[in-house]
Image: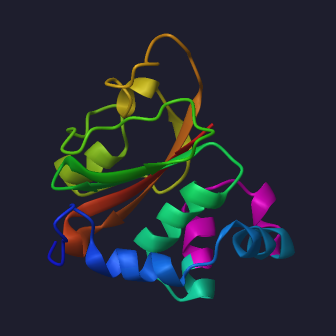
Amino acid sequence: MADIDSQGRHIRTERALARLPRAGAFYSYHHDRGSLYKGPGIETIKQAAGFFGVSLSAAAIRYSQVGNFPVAVIMAHKGKVLWSSISELFPYQYIGKNYPVNGYSEADAFFARKEIDLSPHSVLEDSWFQNDSNFRKERHPLIEQCLPMPGYNSVLTVVWL
């Protein structure tokens, strides 16, 4: 993972984010295509990336920043969290960088066996949010969907309520 600036941000992703629209245009994109009602999974992020001509990472980050839905987007590389972007509406707000992917997440299957279930499925909060101050104070059923990126030895994960 080259092209990291002094603050740990991926330079190409930052450039792509600058090209993405703010909330109004992103909402229009979803509303016009009915995606708003399909949930915030990987397919919606892929469609947005294609429509706006940006990377999956950039689309996922903006998706979590401007949408009015509770979602967390996590990029794991070599079995550890590289970055995360979490909506203000999501009940948990912290995943530490370098947090190890654990066996409760489908992302772990990719790092352990290079095979992964691509469909959305239920997960425990323990999968990603054990270090959040709200962990165990609140209980929320979470849905997780992972997209393996074998060429980067990475997995992009979307978690929502």
Number of marks drawn: 0
Q: Considering depth in this image, is 93 or 111 the residue closer to the camera?
A: 93
> In the rendering, at what x and y percent does residue 120 appear?
56, 48
**Which quarter of the figure has residue 135?**
top left
> In the rendering, at what x and y percent does residue 105 appear?
36, 38
Colour basis: rainbow
44 lies left or right of 42 = right
> Does residue 160 appear in this view?
yes
> Does residue 55 appear in this view?
no
Q: Which residues are magenta?
A: 33-48
> In the rendering, at what x and y percent does residue 65 appear?
56, 57
Residue located 63% across and 39% down the image? 89
Q: Indicate whether 37 appears above or below 14.
A: above
Residue 34 falls within the magenta-colored stretch = yes
Q: Considering depth in this image, is 117 or 63 the residue closer to the camera?
A: 63
7 lies left or right of 60 = left
Quarter of the C terminus within the rendering: top right
127 lies left or right of 33 = left
Residue 47 falls within the magenta-colored stretch = yes
**Which quarter of the figure has residue 88?**
top right
Residue at the limit of the structure toward the front, as seen here: 6
Quarter of the N terminus within the rendering: bottom left
Q: Which SS type dominates the magenta stretch?
A: helix
Residue located 77% across and 60% down the image? 36
> In the rendering, at what x and y percent does residue 96 appear?
27, 38
53 lies left or right of 112 = right
